[in-house]
Amino acid sequence: MKILWNNKIVDESEVKIDTEDRGYQFGDGIYEVIRIYDGLLYMEEEHLERFWRCAEKIRLTLPFTKEEFSQRLHQFAEEVGIKNGRLYFQVTHGTSKPRFHAFPEPQKVMPVLTADIQETSRPLEKLSKGIKGGFVPDKRWLHCDIKSISLLGNILALNEAQENGYDDAILVRDGFVTEASSSNLWMVKDGVIYTHPDGELILPGITKIKVRELAKDLGIELVEEPFTKERLADADECFKTSSVAEVMPIISIDGKNIGDGTPGTITKQLQAAYIEAIEKSVKKM
Ligand code: PMP
C-alpha cells in the first residue's frame, strides 16, 4: 500500500514513525476521512476546513497551506489510482524529546502526516435494510468537536453496543442523545427532523452540512436541539450520517422498533437526495 508520508509518496514498508512521536505516545493528533466517489474527493473543501480548525484547537501549525495540501492529496489519489474508496489522513505533533505532556514549542517540532487510500464500496445492503442501534452512556471527554486520533471513548462505546448484539452505539449524555459512535444521529417525528446542535458534545459532521442543505431543498423542517432517549425511542424514524455510512437508517434501538421497524420515508428521501448530490458533483468534475 502506498502512503503519503509528509510530502513523499512511499510504500508503507518505508514509513518510519519515531516511537517518541506524540501521536504514538499521547494520542496527540487529529485526522480526517474523505470519501472518494469516481475519483472525486467528496466535499474536500469542508473536510480540509475542519482539519485546519481542529489543528488550531490542538495548537498545531500545519507546515503547508490548504491549497498545497489539496494539491498533494490529489496527486496522491491519482498515483494510488483507487476511484472509489476512503482517503484517511492524520497529523500528529511529531517527535519531541524528552517525553513531556505539555505541547512543544512550534519551532522545535515538525508535525508528522500520513495518508492512505483504501478501496471501499457503498454499504448497499445496510443502506436499504437499516441497522440496529443500542443506547450506550456517552463517557467521552468534552472536546468531541475535535476529530482526535484518540478514539478510545468511541471504540469502547461501539464495542459495548456490539457485545449487546447491536450494530452501533447511540450515545446518551445526561439523558440526551448526542451522536452515534462514529456518525451524527438524527430522528424524525411528525415530519420534522431533529439532531443535536454542533458544539463540544459532538463532531460537526461534513455529511451533516450536506443533509442540512438537502432538508432545506426538500422543504423538510430541521430543528437542531438536544432530544432525550425517550423521545428518540418514540420517534417515527431514526438515521445516522457520516462520510462512510452516508444516510444510514436505524430501524430499532435496544431491540424496540423505531416506527414500523423499516427505513422511514424521510430517511429514504434524504438517502436518494444524498446520492443525487454526489452524482451531480461527480458530473461537474
Ligand atoms: N461523529 C463522529 C464521532 C465521527 O467519528 C464521525 C465520522 N468522522 C461523524 C460524527 C460524522 O462526520 P462526517 O460526516 O464528517 O464523516
Image (tube, rainbow, N blue to C red):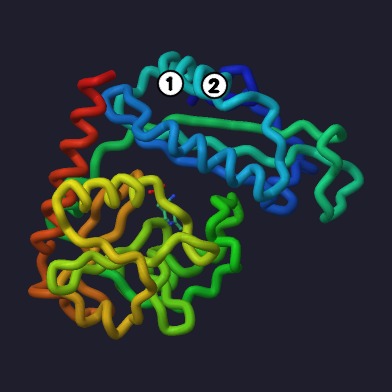
Left or right of 138? Residue 102 is right
Left or right of 35? Residue 143 is right
Reply above or below: 283 against 19: above
| Closer to viewer: mark 1 or mark 2 | 2
Residue 67 got which mark? Answer: 2
Residue 228, image x, y percentages: 35, 81
Residue 255, image x, y percentages: 22, 79
Residue 132 got which mark? Answer: none
Q: Secondary structure at mark 2?
A: helix
Q: Which residue is mark 1?
A: 77
Q: Quadrant of the C terminus?
A: top left
Q: Secondary structure at mark 1?
A: helix
Q: Assess mark 1: CB under 8 A from ligand 1?
A: no
Left or right of 125? Residue 27 is right
Pick out the residue farthest to the right.
Answer: 98
| Residue drawn 51% across the image and 17% down it | 71
| Residue drawn 53% across the image and 57% down it | 145
| Residue drawn 55% across the image and 43% down it | 31
Mark 2 crowd level (few <14, some 14–19, many ≥20, 10 Å Cα): few
Reply above or below: 39 against 50: above
Quarter assignment of residue 258:
bottom left
Q: Nearer the viewer, residue 155 or 267?
A: 267
Residue type at numbered disc 2: Glu
